Image (spheres, grey):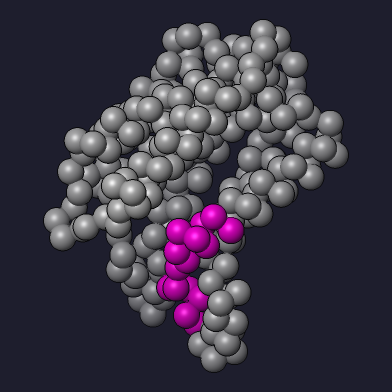
Amino acid sequence: MTEPIAIGPLRLDAMMLAAIGSAAAGLAILKLWLARSPFKEERYWFELAVNAMIWILIGWKLAFLLREPEVLWERPSALIIVRGSGSDTAVGMLLAIVYLGYATRKRRIKALKLLDVLPFALLPACIVWTLITDRWYGIPYAILLAAVYGVLFRTGAAGRAGSGETASLALLGTGIGGLVVSLFAPYPPGELPMLTFGLTTLQWLFILMSLLGIGLPTRRSSG
């Protein structure tokens, strides 16, 4: 998924298409869940999710211009095929967090309520992204994410959205489960992950998610 896709004279970034497809899948599943959730009368959730994902895509695709602004006037066509790095994705996520913070404050939405809604879009989006970009090597992680998604319904946490349980379970399941999977899942041929204190960046991310899941306060109410 690294080569541009050519359609006649048009060259499209395959990774960008994968990102858009993953976001669309996450939003579609979120919309289905919202229609049956305690928040079905609150019409703004889908709008918030769409805007947040747009901010993530903008950051991932364009944050590199902060380092190389000359691309805008020297090679503007490169914007179509140049993609950002992991740090650029982090910029996009930061933009999305800032947007969600502003939007939820404006609408007086409680933080736990927001955190409980996000997994219903993020987990499906991550499943699709993993399967598209990592192909066979992403299957173990996709299965894990699907299992975590199922647990949200199996435990009834999905019906108590707003209590913090959904977010906590999603973080713990993905964090602890992802760390275990990462110890056994194979890497693509020729890929040598960079280690920091003996762990990969992904493994440190899983540890951070686990700690956040443990520390996240939960309460028994629909808020």
User: Which residue is rendered at x = 50% and y = 45% of the image?
Assistant: 23
* Any part of residue 54 in sight: no
User: Which residue is rendered at x = 72% and y = 48% of the image?
Assistant: 99
- Decide if residue 39 is on the left or right side of residue 155: right
Observer-nearest residue: 64 or 182? 182
Give the quadrant of the C terminus. Answer: top right
- Decide if residue 47 is on the left or right side of residue 192: right
**Magenta extent:** 77-91
- Decide if residue 104 is on the left or right side of residue 63: right
Give the quadrant of the N terminus. Answer: bottom left
Taking 109 as reference, is 17 above or below it?
below
Taking 199 as reference, is 165 above or below it?
above
Residue 3 percent location from the top left of the image: 30, 68
Residue 51 percent location from the top left of the image: 66, 48
Residue 85 highlighted magenta (yes or no): yes
Taking 44 as reference, is 129 above or below it?
below
User: Which residue is rendered at x = 71% and y = 49% of the image?
Assistant: 98
Residue 40 percent location from the top left of the image: 69, 21
Label the magenta part by its dominant secondary structure.
Answer: helix
